[in-house]
């Protein structure tokens, strides 16, 4: 099993450009999450989706949009990138009952200049 | 609102000595508690969890954690640290009443194990 996959692994954008980060999981999980990781701040939740067709804002949603395309895929879009969005982005998935623990993708390192 | 505190930015320990990484939490209702480890340039890997039952939970790579409800703590422990345990460790809590489904992560504790 691939688990959680993310593309791309690295990206450099100029201020104002847009891009979409892709995430897919093959574990049949209901919940999916997008986090950003910044030094000394741990992981902060951007958006999450408890099930296909639903999304909800997390702690730091401004400047981002998400799409839960189907049960497997959850994408994160930056419409107009800003230097403050320079970060490492992680996608994760989990089941809604039973085990609960999250499984993480390898991350996308984004630099906005 | 839920929160997690990891009071130590870094823990230094000699190989073979006991390792403890501290975590305290605040959450409405019964907590679901987790520990994750992150190696350089990698995603987070699940170590162990407390959902219900025994207060001492055992996880991967010889790690264990003790849930203490009165102190609202969930400290991670390993009896004998290895150099390969050097990594960034995160404690996380999942709410069961408000903020259902959302995980709150601590800021992380860097563990450095010296030979």
Image: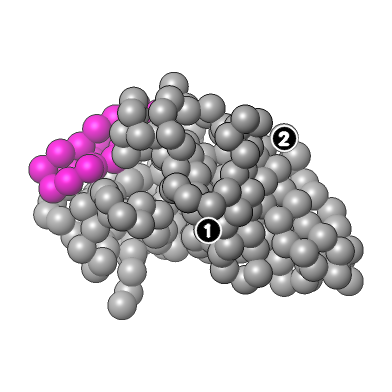
Query: Residue B69, image x and y in percent?
Result: 58, 34
Residue placed most toward the observer, B50 or A64: B50
Looking at the image, the residue that sits furthest to the top is B1
**Residue underneath mark 1:** B48
Task: Name the quadrant of the C terminus of chain B.
Answer: bottom right
Mark 2–mark 1 CB contact (< 8 Å): no
Picture layout, residue B106 above or below residue A20: above
The residue at the point 15 percent across, 56 percent down is: A71
Of mark 2 and mark 1, the one earlier in the sequence is: 2
The answer to whether one can see residue B19 in this image is: yes
> For residue B96: magenta?
no
The image quarter containing residue A14 is top left
**Protein chain holding label 1:** B
> Is B40 displayed left or right of A75 in the figure?
right
The image quarter containing residue B23 is top right
Range of residues picked out in magenta: A43-67
Picture colour scheme = one colour
Kindly identify which numbered label has been placed on residue B7.
Answer: 2
Q: What element carries label 1?
A: strand
Query: Residue A17, image x and y in percent?
Result: 32, 40
Query: Residue A91, image x and y in percent?
Result: 36, 52
The residue at the point 65 percent across, 63 percent down is: B63
The answer to whether one can see residue A12 in this image is: no
The residue mark sitting in front, 2 or 1, is: 1
**Protein chain holding label 2:** B
Q: Distance between the residues labelled 2 and 1?
A: 20 Å
Q: Is mark 2 on a helix, strand or loop?
A: loop
Count of number-bearing discs: 2
């Amino acid at each position: 099993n691939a688990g959680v996959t993310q593309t791309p692994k690295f990206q450099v954008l100029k201020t104002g450009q847009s891009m979409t980060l892709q995430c897919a999981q093959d574990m049949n999980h209901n919940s999916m999450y997008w986090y950003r990781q910044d030094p000394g701040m741990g992981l902060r939740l951007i958006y999450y989706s408890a099930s296909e067709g639903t999304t909800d804002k997390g702690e730091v949603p401004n400047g981002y949009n998400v799409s839960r395309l189907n049960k497997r895929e959850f994408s994160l879009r930056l419409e107009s990138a800003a230097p403050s969005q320079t970060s490492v982005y992680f996608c994760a998935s989990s089941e809604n009952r039973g085990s609960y623990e999250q499984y993480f993708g390898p991350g996308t390192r984004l630099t906005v200049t | 609102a839920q929160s997690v505190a990891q009071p130590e930015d870094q823990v230094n320990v000699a190989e073979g000595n006991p390792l403890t990484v501290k975590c305290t939490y605040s959450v409405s209702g019964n907590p679901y508690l987790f520990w994750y480890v992150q190696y350089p340039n990698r995603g987070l890997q699940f170590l162990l969890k407390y959902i219900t039952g025994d207060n001492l939970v055992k996880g991967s790579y010889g790690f264990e954690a003790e849930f203490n409800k009165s102190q609202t703590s969930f400290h991670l422990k390993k009896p004998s640290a290895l150099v390969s345990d050097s990594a960034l460790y995160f404690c996380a809590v999942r709410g069961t009443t408000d903020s259902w489904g959302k995980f709150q992560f601590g800021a992380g504790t860097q563990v450095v194990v010296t030979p």
